[in-house]
Structures are given as structure tokens and as C-alpha cells.
Image (tube, helix red, strand yellow):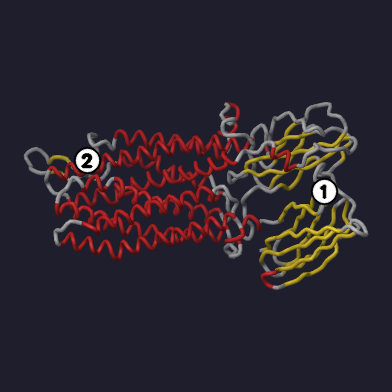
Amino acid sequence: MLWPAAALAHATLESTSPARGALVAHEPSDVVFGFDQTVEGNFGAVRVYDSRGNRVDQGDAFHPGGTGSLIGSHLKPGLPKGSYTATYRVVSADGHIVSGGFLFSIGRAGLGAGLTVAQLLGKSKTGAATEIAFGAARALQFGSIAVAVGAFAFLMLIWLPALSALAGGSEAWRAASEAFARRLRVLLLLAALVGAISALAGVVLEAAEAAGISGWAALKPHVLNEEIGTRFGKFWTAGAAAWLGVGVVATGLLSPRARRAPVLRPASLGAAGLAPPTLPGRILTVVMGVPLALLVLLPVVSGHGDTQHPVGVMFAATLIHVTAVSVWFGGLATVLVALPAATRRLEGPDRIRLLVGVVSRFSPFALGAVIVLLTTGLVQSYVEIRHFNLVTSTPFGRAVLIKFCVLIALIGLGAFNQRRLLPRLRSLARAGQAAGQAGVLLRRSIRTEVALLVVVFGVVGALASYAPSIAQYSGPYQTTTNIGPEQLQLVLDPARVGSNQLHLYLIDPKTGAPIDNAQQLTVAESLPSKQIGPLNQSGVKSGPGHYTVPGVLLNVPGTWSLAVTILVSKFDEYTATVKVPVQ
């Protein structure tokens, strides 16, 4: 009752104007595609080709009547009679690219573009280098967010309280606090630089994918203007601006020489020693906290977290998930990069006392972050995958599985640190001895954790480009495959347990026109995992090249195999098997 059965992911085509395969008496003014959700696209989102493969649209993609779920393009006037192929390449609400097409005729049927819809779309497809670069930009963006947010949280929640409790009055402690501040500033500046570059690169690469061009070709004002007007473009451009704010604040307020820098200062006039650092004032908290809060929202509002139903659950789970991984990864990065700079300024017992004090304070936060990550990750996985068989049978599911396997390894390392290394370091600190081999093992363990988390961010970059596995269950399920020399389009509606309607279309792969040569069409349904079937049914002709099979009973969830057989003559018969997920 709590979980809606429908899932909103990639946009699904619901209608076309003219209709698929239609023969119209007069040239239409435009070609329009209708989807089940708002879509966005640039001037090349809708293209129409004649029989020679030349474009006959005006390239002015627009939303008819201002309706976001409709997108079309006007045709050039005075088109000759014949058949034309229309294609679309648009951006769905979750930032992913969806594409397809159909054939229609004006006046009389003729040859289409001489190329299949897939071939025509391939002419406007980005290369593998652009797709890989886009995944890398996402991974760098998410990693930069985690480093910056986690480092600032470490400063406020771990370092300053520990320094206030442990610092002595010697000049070495002042040098240690300043060394930590300098390293922290470098860490934040590096995160801001990588974050800003990857955000701007993401806008360019998303524009390239939407337009079906290379990344270099997308560096044109009119292409970038179109992309910045999209949902993804707006958020990632705002992200680049937020990174600029982080860099400015880190340069100024976190400098050890700044008046409000979080470092030890000489005591007031007439007193000896050092004054403990005060917690960051409201100015630092606001000017650094606001852009970081906006950056935490970036992965949520530009991906599945803001589009996948139930949106309220996914939005909250993704936001908490991003915050938790930031506290963990950013904290580890700070321990690895900034903390050694501080401990090296101290000698003897003070060095290990600071190390143990800081790591001991960070350990409960890291443990809490891991628990939150597991909890929210399971929620996200259930919403986006929902069925165990899809864990290994879909790219999204496999990426999630890799992510969880790496997380299990990270939990093992954390348990080793918590149960073995920290108790040993505490004993050494109480005895006033150096960290020695225990300190070396701790550094190695943290380096391994950081390296594994970098792998996780790479997987997350890939996850953002995949459709959630549950999207296959959004119904109706549609796919296209070859059956002999012909093309078979299969639509199972609603692709759920119970009675379903099966539509089968036989199409000429070159022209996109329906083929009406099947003397008989049969379908055999089976579910191998449950040893069900085959269940044989005959198709009923519903139009040229169109067959329906009403009342297809699929009473068990799983991945069903539909074996479609067409008899075209006494001697020629073709069969194609399609795997269909049923919820």
C-alpha cells in the first residue's frame, strides 16, 4: 500500500503526429512527438528525413501549446509526395537521453530515408569518448562535493573540539593548528577547482549528448544556450557558481592569517600561552555552509532522486545518502591530507595524543555514516530495482551490486581500525609512546578506504547514466528486434502479473513501413526460472503488419521469454525470442 507500482524514469513515447505509418493527403505543418512526462531538447531534438536522407525539417524544436510533454519541429513547405522518416532525441526529466522514430507518407507511400531509424539516429550520436567523459565528469563532481562537505564538517565537528580539548600552550601547538588550516584550505580549493571544471564540463557534455554531437562541437553559443535552459543545465551551471563561492571563502576566511581563522592564537594581553580556537562564527558558517548545502542538493535534483517515484522517499533518501558519504569520504580525506601536517609539528606524547584524540572523535561519525549509507542505499535499491533478478540482468543493477560489494570491503576495513588499531593507539598514547607501526597501519588502512571510495564514485558516475532497473516495469514494455529479414516491434501492456495485451508490429527495417506478408503468427510464453510454459497462443490480425494477442496471462513475476513465430510461406518461417520483465 505504501509503494506505488508505477515508476517515473526515462520518458516513454505515447503518441505521434502524424500517426506511425500514416498516409496523409496533404503535407502537415509539423511533426510532433508526445511523451508521458516533460521532455527537453535543443534545435536538433526532432529531425525529419526524405528518401535521400536529407533533412526536411526547419530545425526549430518547440513545445506545441507550451505543453512540456510534447515536442515537435516544423517542416519545410512544398515537400514532394513520398515517405519520410521522423526521429527524436530528447532529454527526459531525469537528465537522460531517449530517442526513436517512425515513418509516415505524404500523398503516396514510397521509400523512406533509405536508412533505418537506428541508422539515422546514429548519424547524430555522440561517440564513446564523449560518453566516457560525461561519466567521469559526474564522478569528479560527486567526489568533489563529498570532499568539500566532509572537510568542512570535519573542521566544525571534529578538529576544533579536539583542538580545544587537547592543545597545550606551547608554540608547537600553534604551528600544528596553522598547518592543519593550510592543508584544509588547499583541500577545499582543490575540490572547488575540480568541482567547477567538472560542472561546466558536465553542461557541455550533456549538450553534446542531447544534440548528438561531439563535446568539442557542443562548444558553440547556440548549443550551450539551449542546454543552460534545460533542467540539468540550470542546476549544473548553478553548481559551478556555488563552487566559485567555496573557493573564495576558502581563500579568504580559512587562511591562517585571517582574523577569524580557526587556529590557536596567543592569549589576551597579560596572559601566557595560547587561546583555544572558537567555533566558526556565523559569517563563516553561512558563507561556506550555503554553497555547500546547494552542492549537496545537486546530485539529488539533477538525477533519479527528484524524478523516481515515490519522489518524497527517494528525495529524502538520496539527500541523506549524499550527506552521509560526504561526512565519511571527506573526513577520511581530511585525516589523510590535513591531520599529518598538524601531527608532524608536535613531538613525543603530544603527537600521538592529538592523533588518537582526533581519530577517536571521528570514528563514531564514520560509523554513523556507514549505518546511514547502508539504510538509505537499501531504500534506494528497493525503489529503483525492486526485483532480485534485475540485480544481475540490468546495467543499473550490476552497478549497484558492485557498489555494495565495495562498501562491504570498506566496512571490513573500518571494523579492523575500530577493533584493532584504535585500541592499540590508545594504549600507546596512555604510555606516552610513539605510534610506530600502529600509526603506519592506520595510514595504510585510510589510504585503502579512500581508494575504494574513489571506485565507488566511479560506479556512481556510471549509475547516473543508467535507467533504474524498475523503469523496465513502468509499463507498457516496448522493444524492437529482428525476426528474419524483418523488424519486430513488441508492446506488452501493462507488463504486470495477470492479463496483458500483446501488440506485435512487422516493419520493413529499411523504410519503416509495415510488412503484411505473415500468413500466421504465434507466440509461446514461458518462464524458465519457474519451469512454466511454453504457453502457445495465436495472434489476431488488427491491421497491416499489426497483430494482437489479447488475454496473455502471465501470473508469476519474473523475466518471461516470448517466442514469436511468423509463417510467411509454405517453406519460410522465422522466429525471434524476446525477454520481457513482468512485475
Q: Assign a secondary structure to mark 1.
A: strand
Seen at 26% across and 55% down, the residue is 440
Q: Amino acid at mark 1?
A: Ile
> Looking at the rendering, which quadrant does residue 28 occupy?
top right
Q: Which residue is mark 2?
A: 178
Seen at 79% across and 52% down, the residue is 488
* Residue 142 image position (x, y, % from top left): 45, 46
* Residue 43 image position (x, y, % from top left): 66, 31
How packed is label 2: few (under 14 Cα within 10 Å), some, or many (20 or more)?
many
Could you say which disc has been placed on residue 507 in the image? 1
* Residue 216 image position (x, y, % from top left): 56, 31
Is residue 55 shown left or right of residue 442?
right
> Is residue 19 visible to the viewer in this orientation of the structure?
no
Q: Amino acid at mark 2?
A: Glu
- Against 378, residue 354 (above or below) is above
> Is residue 198 visible to the viewer in this orientation of the structure?
yes
* Residue 108 image position (x, y, % from top left): 90, 37
Q: Is the N terminus in the top left, top right, bottom left or bottom right quadrant?
A: bottom right
Q: Assign a secondary structure to mark 2.
A: helix
Could you say which disc has been placed on residue 475 in the image? none
Seen at 18% across and 41% down, the residue is 175
Q: Nearer the viewer, mark 2 or mark 1?
A: 1
> Looking at the rendering, which quadrant does residue 230 occupy?
top right
Q: Is the C terminus in the top left, top right, bottom left or bottom right quadrant?
A: bottom right
Residue nearest the viewer, comparing 512 with 34? 512
